Amino acid sequence: MTNRSSWKTVCGILLLCAATVVASHAQTFTSLVSFNGFNGAYPYYGSLVQGTDWNFYGTTYQGGGPGNVFRITREGAVSTVHRFCAETGCTDGANPFGGLVLGADGSVYGTTSGGGTAGLGTVFKITPNAKLKTLHSFNRIDGAIPIGTLIQATDGNFYGTTSQGGSNNDGTVFKISPDGMLTTLYIFCAQPNCTDGVSPIAGLVEGTDGNFYGTTIKGGLNNKDSGTVFRIARTGTLTMLHSFNGRDGANPYGGLVQGNESLYGTTESRGPNGGGTIFKITSQGTFATVYGFGVENTYPVDGLIAGTDGNLYGTTSKGGAGSNLGTVFNLGSGGTVTTLHSFDTTDGANPYGSLVQSTNGDFYGTTRVGGAEGYGTVFTLSMGLAPFVRMVSTSGRVGQTGGILGQGLTGTTSVSFNGTAAPFTVVSDTFLKATVPAGATTGYVTVTTPSGTLTSNVPFHVLP
């Protein structure tokens, strides 16, 4: 059952004892679709995103051309929303690596690693009526080859990273408004010997303190090839929080997830057992290795997500029972790592992306290759978790109206922000809008439907 304690639980369970790998049989895995090369091929980093229509949206690096945006229903029917390089010279973009983010306006936003007016990548949005608009083309000076997924912050702007470009060609952090005005906030390798980091691959996370946090795959104090964790203010002031040294992991390709007191992330390689790590770090840089991957499940490429049961969930690109083709795992109470599924090629192989939890309680993800045609798959994993609602934006001020995703919302009778009733409008069975009411305080959002009360997966922060 989804409850208010689950968000707090994930923040304190991870170092209580040494982590061990155990098997689990309390889940149901389903392979939904195998890409065939025309409807998509090779989904890489990032996760799927749930739209206001309850369908999921994602990107593939290739397929029918240099990549596409696809839509998949909960039953597994896949369709192409946009095929890149539809414009002369690929000015609409090419080869998206990262995932998509749902904006407050109902559009989905993303990046491509190539194409655009300079061939160095773009930022784009796709409106609810499936029209693509290119918001920005990178020109190397302001960045190049964005790979990570964007986030929409509490100020309404989107924030992201480029893996190259800037004056040192070592990557940037940028801000872009919903209408396409881009500001470069930071250029990496601005410090001697690149101690501030080189090449951010993942996107950012907005911390509860209002700063942004991210990772670079290279640079740092200890080894220029190991990577860093950093904090960056909205003004562009960057603080390097941790330099990986190999023993505590190296090359964090994935982003971070915010817990109650710490942020959690993964490194793709090295660590105590040689196969990457799970780590946690505070906003001030206090660092601890939570788990070292080894033979059973190894090389986590992307980051973790927090499930509504209080566990952290992720994927590894290698390892697994007899296959060495990757796994889905969780990290639960007592520091126990559980392998939930091992891929065997027929159902996918080598997952590079992170998972997303649907508001029906199930998890969805992709594999980079494998499946019937070898071009990758989309899968779902049910852990028997209860439905919930998700805020499109997890913070806002009194008087602001935001979206709420769910299912069975037709006939909703009330919406409350931490117990304070809010005005709302039901848009569809899977989407409604609610206004932050006067007197609301930070806490969970509840939606009362004819089938029962649904609670948000994370607290909503009421801003001053």
Image (spheres, rainbow, N blue to C red):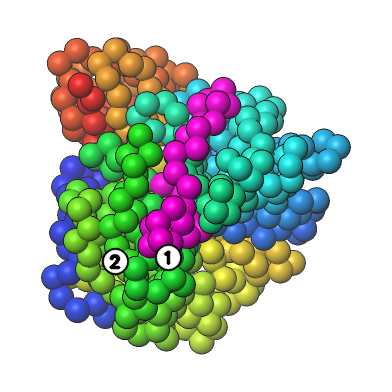
Is 159 on the left-hand or right-hand side of 80? Answer: left
**What secondary structure prevails in the magenta region?**
loop
- Closer to us: 209 or 344: 209
Q: Name the residue under label 2.
A: 279
Q: Is 311 a magenta residue?
A: no
**What's under tag 1, amino acid-wise?**
Asn
Residue 263 lies, in percent from the top left, at 27, 54
| Quarter of the image that includes the C terminus | top left
Mark 2, residues whose alpha carbon is within 10 Å: few (<14), some, or many (≥20)? many
Is 43 on the left-hand or right-hand side of 248? Answer: right
Secondary structure found at label 1: helix
Residue at 23% x, 39% y is 209
Residue 451 lies, in percent from the top left, at 33, 31
Question: Image quarter for residue 205?
Answer: top left
Q: Is 128 rendered above or below residue 151?
A: above
Outermost residue on the right side: it is 88
